[in-house]
Amino acid sequence: MRDKIRVGVVGIGRGRSFARGAGELTGMKLVALCDTWEERLEQTGNEFGVETYTDFDRFLEHDMDAVVLANYFHEHAPFAIKALAAGKHVMSETSACFTLAEGVELVRAVERSGLTYMFAENYPYMVFNQEMRRLYQAGEVGTAMYAEAEYIHPDPADVVMGRSPGMYHWRNWIPATYYCTHSLGPIMYITETWPEKVNGFIMRAYDDDLVMDRIIKFSDPSSMIALRMDNGAVVRLVQVRLRGHGVWVRVHGSRGLMENLRGGDRNMLRVVREQYHEERRHPQEVIYQPDFPEFHEQATKAGHGGGDFFTNYHFAEAIRTGEAPFLDVYRGVTMSIIGPLAYRSALDDSNTIDVPDFRREEDRKRFEDDDWRPDPREGNPWPSIEGRIEPTQEQIDYSRAVWRERGYDGE
């Protein structure tokens, strides 16, 4: 039997899913956890029977092969770069980087290391997205002309604040365009196209939104991003906190349409192929339940529609084979920088911005010092298109009460 890949996980919230996935089938073994929330860290360490660390540098000294980063959204790149320098393979949760300069530094760090880096964007591996990739790559709908993807995730105020403990927790302030990889990831996976131009649009909050009345929020609720891809296709992405929860992906090709259903069983796939001037091989329209192409039983038990299983699996396989995963550092950084570029566009009346290609060193040189970062603690720029937003005392009191219920006593 092959030796197990010894993995350490940073972040015991989202990281629990990765910790559970480091099992027999993937050939990984969880050996260490790292987090700054000491009480929860100790509980989780006891649950999994592994060593725990509150200091990341000491964590990296642990005898292990790879690190999974499930820490805060805006902190992944510095942790990944340090782990690579310590000789560890890295799988990073979204986003891969928070600034364009971080993206440049991360790409260079991966290239220097010769180690595996995988971007843990799990939405491409949902069953309907894997089926759409299979159909697209087989030429069943022709060439992508237009695509849409939506990641809509509203919640009641207590749930929103329960997963955002602390006044300046990243979920309370990242600009609305930044959480875009759950929508862009499936499009890039299905079609293997890359974004070349971006326009960003922000949806503001309104006074009759009873959730926004209660939560701490320094940024806007939602955004729409328009992209021109490298094959000429146009893509529309919508995210995050609109009403009408759901994940939806549609691809219009030159010879057909594919989309998962908006209602009912959303894993069901609708495929339309008129087959004009073609020998008819398919019904004009079919709706069916696809299966995962492999590991169906294991994937159906995993989180995020099976995506959490496949990110672990492909990370382990990439380490063993030495071949870069599909979601490599270049795709991960490209998906991630769309967020800040789209926000820049939104601040500039939604004008078009060119997307750099960090596979090219000449593009990296242009952005290696670009550390532009909206952050309410710095305020330049503010992470809301409305300008400076400060929480009311009522919002602060409500949020702190939720945090206390969940065992968080910080500010």
Image: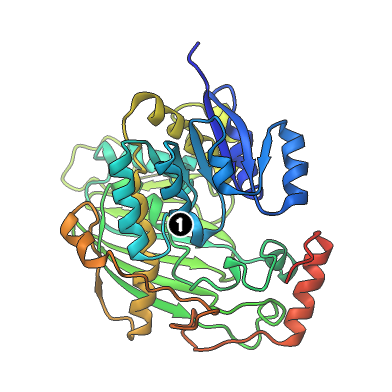
User: Number of numbered discs present?
Assistant: 1
Q: Quadrant of residue 216?
A: bottom right
> Which of 383 and 50 lies nearest the eye of the viewer?
50
Residue 111, percent across and down? Answer: 28, 43
Q: Quadrant of residue 110?
A: top left
Q: Is residue 21 above or below residue 69?
A: above
Q: Is residue 278 above or below residue 339?
A: above
Residue 244, percent across and down? Answer: 59, 66
| Amino acid, disc 1 | Ser
Residue lying at the far top of the rendered structure: 1
Residue 334 appears in the rendering: no
> Which of 264 and 145 lies nearest the eye of the viewer?
145
> Which of 243 and 372 lies nearest the eye of the viewer?
372
- The type of colouring in the image is rainbow
Q: Residue at 71% across / 33% down in the picture? A: 48
Q: Residue at 70% across / 68% down in the picture? A: 161
Residue 405 appears in the rendering: yes
Q: Residue at 72% across / 72% down in the picture? A: 411
Residue 2, percent across and down? Answer: 48, 14
Q: Residue at 18% across / 55% down in the picture? A: 361
Q: Is residue 204 left or right of residue 193?
A: right
Instruction: State the residue position of label 1.
Output: 95
Q: Is residue 211 left or right of residue 93?
A: right
Q: Is residue 295 above or below residue 14?
A: above
Within 10 Å of disc 1 (Cα), the crowding (few <14, some 14-19, many 20+) is: many
> Which of 274 and 357 lies nearest the eye of the viewer?
357
Residue 60, percent across and down? Answer: 53, 40
What kind of element bears circle 1?
loop
